[in-house]
Image (tube, rainbow, N blue to C red):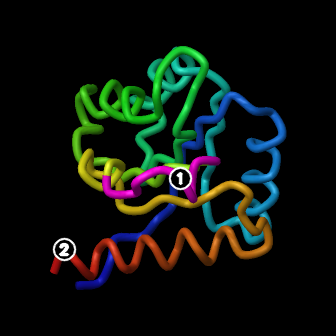
Amino acid sequence: MTPPPLKKILHVDDSDDIRELVRHGLERDDKYTLMFCASTDEAIDRAPTFGPDLLLLDSIMPDISGVGLYEKIRAQPGLENTPVIFLTTQAETLDFTSFLRVGAIDVIGKPFDVNTLADTIDEIWREHWARQA
């Protein structure tokens, strides 16, 4: 199955530094339209009008877990099937299957390589859609 094009990514992280790293990693070749949100409320408010193809969510926000945020975003009309990749600092201690059970297509550990982030996300996207075939 040929994956649909990945054009719009919504990234949510309360860390200015992480948002800037992701911006740097994904804006280099202008193939994505990106939206960055620093809070749960901002993400929930802006996601429906942005209509992301992919959610890139911090696993732990100050007021809610990444999973909780994912559930709130997916509860909105038109976003029910939006794939998610979680970014987590808990990469070595957390059971990745807990993210997969809630529908994540993958998990990227922090720190991540800014120079290969776009390639990593593209590979995850292709593998996800290949599994759907």
Image x and y of residue 6, in percent: 46, 65
How many labels sit on residues?
2
Q: Residue at x 30, y 30 (%)?
A: 71
Residue under label 1, please give it.
93
Image x and y of residue 14, in percent: 68, 28
Stretch of the chain drawn in magenta: 89-97
SS class of the residue under badge 2?
helix
Residue under label 2, please give it.
132
Give the distance between the C-alpha atoms of the residues marked 2 and 1, in whole angstroms.
29 Å
Is disc 1 surrounded by few (<14), some (14 to 19) or many (20+) residues within 10 Å?
A: few
Is disc 2 surrounded by few (<14), some (14 to 19) or many (20+) residues within 10 Å?
A: few
Image x and y of residue 107, in percent: 48, 59
Q: Amino acid at mark 2?
A: Gln
Q: Residue at x 40, y 57 (%)?
A: 96
Q: Amino acid at mark 1?
A: Thr
Q: Nearer the viewer, residue 5 or 114?
A: 114
Q: Nearer the viewer, residue 53 or 133?
A: 133
Contact (Cβ within 8 Å) of mark 2 with mark 1: no
